[in-house]
Amino acid sequence: MSPSQVIVVATPVFLLLIAAEFAYGRWRGRNTYRLNDAINSMSLGVLSQVAAVLTRLFRVGIYTAVFSWVSVWHAPTFWGSPIGWLLALVFYDFCYYWLHRAGHEVALFWAAHVVHHQSQDYNLSTALRQTSSGALLGWVFYLPMAVAGVPPKLFGIVVLVDLLYQYWVHTEHVGKLGWFDRVFCSPSNHRVHHAVNDGYLDRNYGGILVVWDRLFGSFREEGEPCVYGTRAPLESWDPLWSNAEVYWGLAKDSWHARSWADKVRVWFKPPG
């Protein structure tokens, strides 16, 4: 079963947890949901899964080809052991950190990733708000795993584990967790990531581990209340425009740039 198929099977659980979070928030007098925003997030989730089906052969084919032709270490026994599985998961999370960081620091990757940040609410439905175009270039960051010899099947498993882990951190109803916050991506750490406060912008990229942020200088602890969304609000509930908005802006900037170097540079400069 592919990761996208597992996500489809897990969708009823996601929806049940969303309903539970909504009910809990209402009971606590702190509702974090708006109906139109939640529906838009779920619509973007459905669209991203359709895109995942259409691009699966492309993504899996490239990884498998690199693994078959270039990998430097074929060790099926090692990768089949618990230590191999754990190492593959940590390896994936490290690669994910750099993809995620590029998604905030390079305009072309931000054009794909911005979908996940457009909501001005922060709840479990936000976790379903995923890009439909990220797979077109995101695979580049995982090629080191193929070169190192991580089998495609194991790669698919750790992708799923990392993705499922990140669902629960999209909530305002879990406070700080002490030592856990210092090692792992937690609700507190990820709230900072989604915030547009000046002190929080472009921080806490880790998927499962936040130690990457501590190592590479992108960590910020939660302090002041978070303000969510993007610096330039989407102002639309259209899921297709959500995916296309930044690409369209970059295309216009590139068209109007005077030199050919600037026309290319537009796509690789920092967002904004």
Image (tube, grey):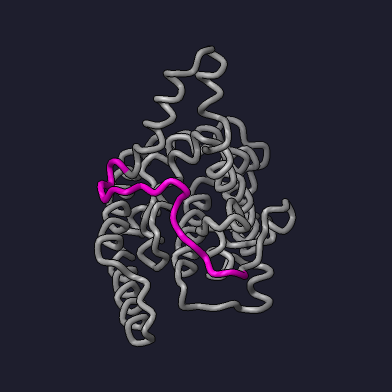
Q: Is residue 259 magenta?
A: no
Whole-percent x and y of residue 218?
67, 53
Image-quadrant location for residue 70? top right
Whole-percent x and y of residue 242?
33, 44
Q: Is residue 67 visible?
A: no
Viewed as shown, does residue 211 lie left or right of 102?
right
Viewed as shown, does residue 98 lie left or right of 17?
right
**Above or below, comparing residue 24 to residue 249 in the picture:** below
Whole-percent x and y of residue 215?
74, 55
Q: Is residue 271 visible?
A: yes
**Above or below, comparing residue 106 to residue 20 in the picture:** above
Region in magenta? 223-241
Outermost residue to the bottom: 27
**Above or below, comparing residue 173 to residue 227 in the picture:** below
Q: Is residue 232 magenta?
A: yes
Quarter of the image that includes the N terminus: bottom left
Residue at 28% across, 47% down: 239
